[in-house]
Amino acid sequence: MQKGMHTDTERCVRAVQSKDARFDGWFFTAVVTTGIYCRPSCPVVPPKPENMRFHPSAAACQQAGFRACKRCRPDTSPGSPEWNQRADLVARAMRLIADGVVDREGVPGLAARLGYSTRQIERQLLAELGAGPLALARAQRAQAARLLIETTPLPMADIAFAAGFASIRTFNDTVREVFALAPTDLRARAPRGNPGSATGALTLRLPFRAPLNPDNLFGHLAATAVPGVEEWRDGAYRRTLRLPYGHGIVSLTPRPDHIACRLTLGDLRDLTVAISRCRRMLDLDADPVAIDDQLRTDPLLAPLVDKAPGRRVPRTVDEAEFAVRAVLGQQVSTAAARTHAARLVTAHGERVDDPEGGLTHLFPSPEALASLDPESLAMPRTRRTTFTTLVRGLADGELRLGPDSDWPETRARLLELPGFGPWTVDVIAMRALGDPDAFLPTDLGIRRAAEELGLPSTPAALTSRAAAWRPWRAYAVQYLWATDSHPINFLPV
């Protein structure tokens, strides 16, 4: 699989004829005889090759006048893995669009964040995705509207504005155009008895490309959970979310073919952003087949991959929060890092109400942490300096961590901070910035695993050997960590 796969007609036809779900999200098939577009794994009889047209995005299909298939629901495909494995302008723009920036700040706001003109942004997105930022955001709004229509009893007018539409008329027209059904007809087709209707929570399924091994993914999140902000309960990872219009609480449960997601939001306009951040935290848009195939080329890694394929990189819903927690975790145990973080949460976090109990706070914002007394921090003086320098930089905007971060530039900025060495920078790059090639050759767990497997154990030699694992070294880290009996590698009982 590669950039611009939709241009490889022969390969796309083979994927459609074999109903290969691995390609869902990589491209979309528009059928000229029916006027609909599908995901490659659509269960219907494949159309004749001469009637297929391939597009790189759902938005491009909609721009070309095609409507979404009612059987395979292509608008709910996993996202393209490209946007999380690349750091170029188009990938950064797509991550920001998924985070709702166009809806909140418009295309000029998107361009300003990326440091390019609106014309440059539109030209590059159109060239690669067949649709500009407005069309891509519109497709995202349509998907959010569909979720709200099908999973809540909200009046259509409320749904229109919650999904980001400027008017009810635009909402009605878009839903009809994209789904070939009026909003009321979409609701009539939805399954009855949705539990979200009774509790006020939204219940939905987050798709992914198989295989997905949940052990290290949810194990890591549960083992490092900060009391009050995160918890593991009844087979689900739960946490509070700081969102653009308010706060939310999410519950995420691993299932064999999807992640069950239950969201409680203070403001429904945050729906799309919350889903995007949860998908990013769980690395659900990864392409595990391509990743594992590359790692299997190393004979010492191959048995680890074969034993438990589909490992994901546990990431974060808040890049600034993770950077703070990375500093708290420097040279201390997982339990000690949780204790430090819990103290900060109690003293400086914003209280929230959890209908189910258990969660009490949002993690403190950089602005709140920048005003604390450094002497109140129970850590060595040098680490206090590291902590205060980081939170000041985040609070005043000198240091920006987000889905739009330029990975090399952000790494360089972090390395300039006192107390930031390669381990801290790489763990932030891996879990907060989402760099799939971040590597931790100085990590004690990695060095132990390397020695046990017969890999070079010195950082320089291991880095040299790991060159063959690129661009997926962050995933190799997960497989190496998994050789240990640490709780991060196991689902809680």
Image: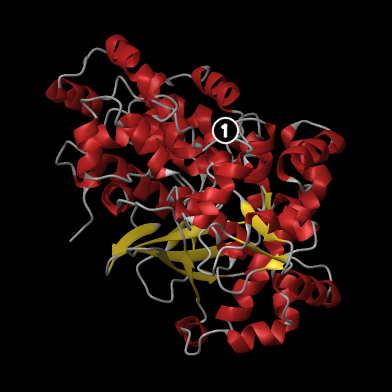
**Residue drawn at the location 71% of the way across and 69% of the way down:** 34
| 436 left or right, relative to 366 | left
Of 486 and 139, which appears nearest the observer? 139
| 252 left or right, relative to 220 | right
| 126 left or right, relative to 3 | right
Label 1 secondary element: loop
Q: Residues within 10 Å of mark 1 (few under 14, many from 20)?
A: some
Of 72 and 46, which appears nearest the observer? 46
Q: Is residue 122 above or below residue 156?
A: above
* Residue 26 seen in the figure: no
**Residue drawn at the location 29% of the way across and 66% of the way down:** 233
Q: Position of residue 134 (x, y in %)?
A: 80, 53
Q: Position of residue 74 (x, y in %)?
A: 59, 63
Q: Is residue 444 above or below residue 152?
A: above
Of 209 and 478, which appears nearest the observer? 209
Of 267 and 277, which appears nearest the observer? 277
Image quarter in which the C terminus is found: bottom left
**Residue drawn at the location 49% of the way across and 49% of the way down:** 285
Q: Position of residue 160 (x, y in %)?
A: 74, 74
Q: Position of residue 299 (x, y in %)?
A: 22, 25
Q: Is residue 476 above or below residue 364?
A: above
* Residue 199 seen in the figure: yes
Would you name the residue on which mark 1 appears? 86
Q: Is residue 23 above or below residue 120?
A: below
* Amino acid beneath label 1: Arg
**Residue drawn at the location 60% of the way across and 57% of the way down:** 273
Q: Residue furthest top?
A: 460
